[in-house]
Every structure is written in structure tokens, then in C-alpha cells.
Amino acid sequence: MPWYLYLALKQLFPTGRWFSFFAFVSIVGVMLGVAVLVIVQSVMNGFGAEIRDKLVKTFGHVRIETGQIIYDPEALIEELEADPAVDVANQFAEGMVLLQFENRPSFPVVRGIDVNTEDQVIPIDDFVWGGTLDDLDDERIFVGSGLAKSLGLGVGDHVEVYSPLMLEKLKADEVLLPRELEVAGIFETGYGQIDGNTVVVTLRLMQELYALGDGVHGVMVNLKDETAAEEFAHAYSQTHERPLRATTWLDANQDLLFVLRLEKNVMFFIIIFIILVASFSIANSLLTSVVRKTREVGLLGAMGALPRDIGWIFALQGFIIGVVGTTAGMAFAFTALAYRNEFVHTLAKWTETEAALVRFYQFVNLPVRYMPKDLIIIGLSAIVISTLAGLLPAWRAARLKPSDALRNE
Amino acid sequence: MSEATPILSSLGLAKAFKGPDGVVRVLESVDLTVAPGESVSIRGESGAGKTTLLYLISALETPDRGELHWDGVNVMKKSASWRARRRGDFMGFVFQAYYLIPELNALENVLIARRLVGKVTPADRQRATELLERVGLKERLRHTGQQLSGGERQRVALARALINRPRLILADEPTGNLDEHTGDEVMDLLLNLTNEEQTALVLVTHNPTFAERTHRHLFLKAGEMQV
Ligand SMILES: Nc1ncnc2c1ncn2[C@@H]1O[C@H](COP(=O)(O)OP(=O)(O)O)[C@@H](O)[C@H]1O
Ligand SMILES: [Mg+2]
């Protein structure tokens, strides 16, 4: 071990003591910053992953559309399913209807799904309660939970549905008879925009309401490998002529995904300030230590030390604080997150708010996802910042002339 | 002794400092030759430039004029890093104010001088322990500076100065901070050890009794060396 590393370690962890007060305070500062960063970023990753998961489940990996009615979806589906990358392909049609329950009107998006195929791109059963996909037929409907709530709907209620096509009939002075449908289930994706404004019917009913014949609006596709969506969509658009085009769930939710990323980055820059503040106190303490140790610097010069190596004593202290603080901070964060449920539970007990645990329920299931890239960025930032904090003191120490330092009173 | 290459030889060393009231010419022309194993005492009034001279002959300070040879090598023609390295294993220092490193215990304080010039081997530990025993600190190896008295600290500094088997020890008023009795003990150790180890010694002191005990006695006055 070079002597300057030895002295740097000894100044932080002197003989006969575990650590110096300075080392303790500095390491705790860096540790807190790193721990908070890891906890916040990992929880945000967790929430982000849940949202992305929901987006994928409600959209499918890729959609093939033309912007018009597709009259021969069978051929399209056959071609898609022949592709080894494709797992499932379902046709669908989408539009808007007027839905009325006891004279309360609403204008939800209606999605017609093909109930005849066994494999479904969208795992509807994961979302529906009060019924399953098997209960859906041409006389029944699934209603989003938000919409059901605002209309006061329950399973078994009957609703009236008018399609835009019926308006044409109205113009022709024909009698206007709505479709009467029974609510077969309520679905909740946890995604407010969908739950508050969507109903699901069979594709055949949708084709009837919109007079599509056998036509559909598009095909949703799930791939065997979810991460290959963009690649697949790109290749598809390359090999197929307009107006056929492929849209991934990423394209469709660009804005939301952008906000998620932005939020995470903003949080990073806010929390990194904890480490910056800690680094200022490291720099300050090391500068004080250079002044206090001026005569020792002179002694080292007399014993053959080079100015550069004297600088290393102080630069290395910043680096060591960074490494130890980062390690401690990561360990702290991993432990805290591993026991997060127990922690919330105990907190509720202490504060005698066991009843409020119900409200905490979502919190108990705090989602966490560690991303190696985040951990590396956090660790490197903390180490670089604390090393920088040691550079100014190091430079001051290296500039001291041993003969002047020895005369220092 | 005269035919051997001197450990140290300086010729016409001069040094002036720029102070707030103009230039202070401290050393005008100092000639000093020290033979291997020889001990030399330097006395002089406070402010005569004794400390400055020690810094010049150890090349911690650069002279304005003059020549300096360590063991026949012209020091000023060498690089700063050569001078630093050579100083580390060629010379040992004992200062008035001990200068122990507070984070280290006695043994580690002795060994730090070894670390600066190379690796610490078990043999070095053995020698450091023996030196500390020799200066009477057998029971104090793991005490830190704070846990030692002034005299004990100076003994650690003595062992530290000797650990690298230097050819020359520079001692700047080593008993200046000690009471008479302790000072006597430390001085006995310094003179006996340099004698045993065949190390040359340049001793700056105010005490005429100590000065008398070296081979040669010099006075620094008016910027020049006088016998
Ligand atoms: N770095 C310096 N700058 C200016 N003057 C100095 C410096 N170092 C020493 N001096 C001056 O040089 C003179 C000799 O100092 P010093 O060598 O310490 O004397 P001594 O050790 O004999 O008491 C003093 O007058 C002191 O003020
Ligand atoms: Mg002096």
C-alpha cells in the first residue's frame, strides 16, 4: 500500500478508534444521499413498471391499422400468425356510442373484441369482476369501473346503446330503437382514462352497431418477446405498403412514458443535492485538516514525500468517503426496501393507526424494481462528487512548501 | 577521516528572505563539511539562521548561492524528486516540537519514515521495536502521541529519525521543549545512538554542555560559520 493511502486511511480510521468524527459525519452524509436516491429511484421504477405493464396489457404489443375499415382481416391475421415472432393476433373494432342508463347518458368508447378466439391479446379476465369473458355475448356488455360508478351501474343492470349509425336512420324518419344490453361484468384496469370511459362488447355486436359487415378497424398483436415490439413494427412498416401501418404500445403512450422518465430524472437531480451538500462539508473539513496538519505536511516533506503524494493523502480521503458512503447507502437502501412492508406495518402499530392500514394498503405493496443502470449512475455520481470535494484541499496541501510548513506555528 | 568522502559539504551557501521591511540577509556564506560518523554542534543567537541552514543543507530550501554535496553528489544539479527521495533515506530529522502524527501509535510513527521510502518488512518492524526499546519505550509501543509525555514523544521522534539507517541526523534544538532532566536523557540517547549507528550528526542547540559533547563545535554569527 502506498504510504499516502495508508495515511489517508489512518486519518479517517485512526489507530485505537473505529473512525474519526469527520469520517463518521462525512460517510453518513454520502450514505443518506445514496440511500434516498436508491430508494426513490427504485420505487419509481416499480411504479413505472406497473404502469408500463398496464399499458401493454390494455393495448397489446403492436397494432396493425390502416385508418380505414379492413375488410379482409382473416388474411391479415393468417399472415401475422405465420410470423414466428408473433404470439397472438386478434381483430378488433373501436368506436363511440351513446350509452344510457335510467335516462343518464354517457358517450364511452366501445371496443369490440373477438370472443371466438381462444388466445386473447388483452387478458380481460385479469381486469373483470362479476363475470368472465365466457359471459360476454351479443346481448351483454362489460363496463369500465369509473363509468359504472358515475352511472350507478351494477352487474345485471340493463343499458341502452345508440350508435352513430342510428342517427342516419333518424334523419330518414325511421323509428329509433336502441340496443338493450345487460351488464355482464365491471372491469378495472387501474388506469383512470380507460376505466372511466370504455365499454367492451363482442366484435360481432360492434360490427352490427357500426354496420361494418365483416370488417374491423385493426389487429392487435402480442409478440413472443415484448421487448421486440419496436423492431417488429419497424420491419412490418418496411415490408408492407401504406395504408397498413404498425403502432407499438410505446408509440401510442409516448407522452406518458416521457413524463415518467422526466419525473425520474428530476427526482435524481433534486436528491443528488443531498450528496452535493455533504461534499461541501467534506471539502470544508478537509481544508481545515490541511491547515491543522500543516506541520505534519512539513515533516512528511522532510522525510522525502513529494508534493504530489502529499496531495494524494487528502484527495484519497474524499474518494474513500465516497466509496464507503456509497456502499453503506446501498446496503441501507436494500435493507430498508426489503423490510418496507414490515416497516409500514410497525409504523401503523406504533402510531396506533392500524385502521389506517387499510388506507396504507397500496403503500404496503410498494412496488420496487432495481435497475443496475440506476445503481451504477448513483454510485458513480456519489464517488465522483466526494472525490471532487477532496481535490481543492489536496491542491492546497500539495502547494505547501515543507520548509514553510515546518516553521508554521 | 579526512580522506573519506564527506557525508555533507557545503561551500558559500547564502540565503536572504524578502520580508515586509525589505530583504533580510540571513546567511552570507556558509562552509560546512561533515565527515562520516562525525558529530558537529552549531550554536548561535536566536535568529542567527541555524534553522535556515539546516533547511538549506537538507535541500528543503534552495540557496541563493553556493554549492551543496551529499556524499559527493552535487545536489543542486539533481531533480526535485531525486532530492526528496534521497533526503528520505539519507537523512533523519529531529525537531524541537517532535511532530508525531496523531492518528498513529508510537510504532506506526516510527515506521511511517520507512513507508515513505519503501515497503515495510517484518525486519523493519523488528528494528522499529528494537529502536523503541532502546529509547526506553518498550511499554509504550501502541500509545498514541496524546498518551505520551514530551520526553517520550521526542524519543519516538529519535527512533523515527534512525529507522532508515540514515548517514546523517539533523537535530534542531531537540531538547528545547523539555525540562532539564528529560532534556539530558534525550540528549544522551541522541549522542549514544548516533555513535552506535555510526551516523553523522549536526546538532543545533543553545546548551553549551550539550554542544561540548560533539566532535566539533561551531558558531553561526553574522551569516558565517565560526569555529
Ligand atoms: N520564510 C521566511 N521568510 C522570511 N524570513 C524568514 C523566513 N524564514 C526565516 N526567516 C528569517 O530568517 C532569520 C533566521 O531564522 P532562523 O533560521 O529560524 O533562525 P534560528 O533558527 O537561528 O533562530 C530570522 O530573522 C527569520 O525571521
Ligand atoms: Mg531555529
Image: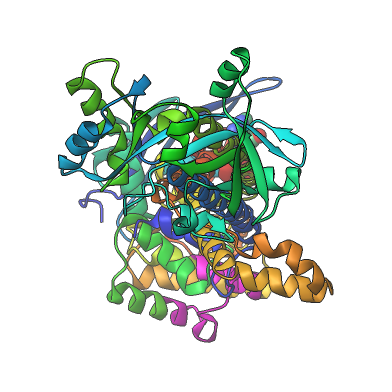
The relative height of residue B81 versus residue B215 in the rendered view (above or below) is above
Q: Residue at x 57, y 19 (%)?
A: A169
Tell me residue B212's x, y (percent).
52, 62
The relative height of residue A334 versus residue A39 in the rendered view (above or below) is below
Is residue B227 among what the camera can see? no
The relative height of residue A209 versus residue B160 in the rendered view (above or below) is above
Query: Which residue is situated farthest in the bottom direction here?
Result: B139
Q: Is residue B156 magenta?
A: yes
Query: Which residue is situated farthest in the right direction here?
Result: A352
Tell me residue B97's x, y (percent).
62, 58
Q: Residue at x 37, y 67 (%)?
A: B163
- Image position of A36 (left or right of A252): right
- Image position of B102 (left or right of B202): right
Count how many numbered circles sit on residues in the image.
0
In the image, the segment drawn in magenta is: B131-157
Quadrant of the frame with the N terminus of chain B = bottom left
* In the foreground, B127 or B74: B127
Is residue B215 among what the camera can see? yes
* In the foreground, A331 or B106: A331
* In the foreground, B39 or A63: A63
- Image position of A153 (left or right of B198): right
- Image position of B113 (left or right of A198): left
Q: Secondary structure of the magenta portion, mostly?
A: helix
Tell me residue A31's x, y (percent).
58, 56
* In the foreground, A191 or A306: A191
Q: Is residue B139 magenta?
A: yes
The relative height of residue A61 versus residue B6 in the rendered view (above or below) is above
Q: Residue at x 54, y 35 (%)?
A: A110
Query: Which residue is situated farthest in the front direction here?
Result: A174
Colour scheme of the rendered structure: rainbow
Tell me residue B85's x, y (percent).
32, 47
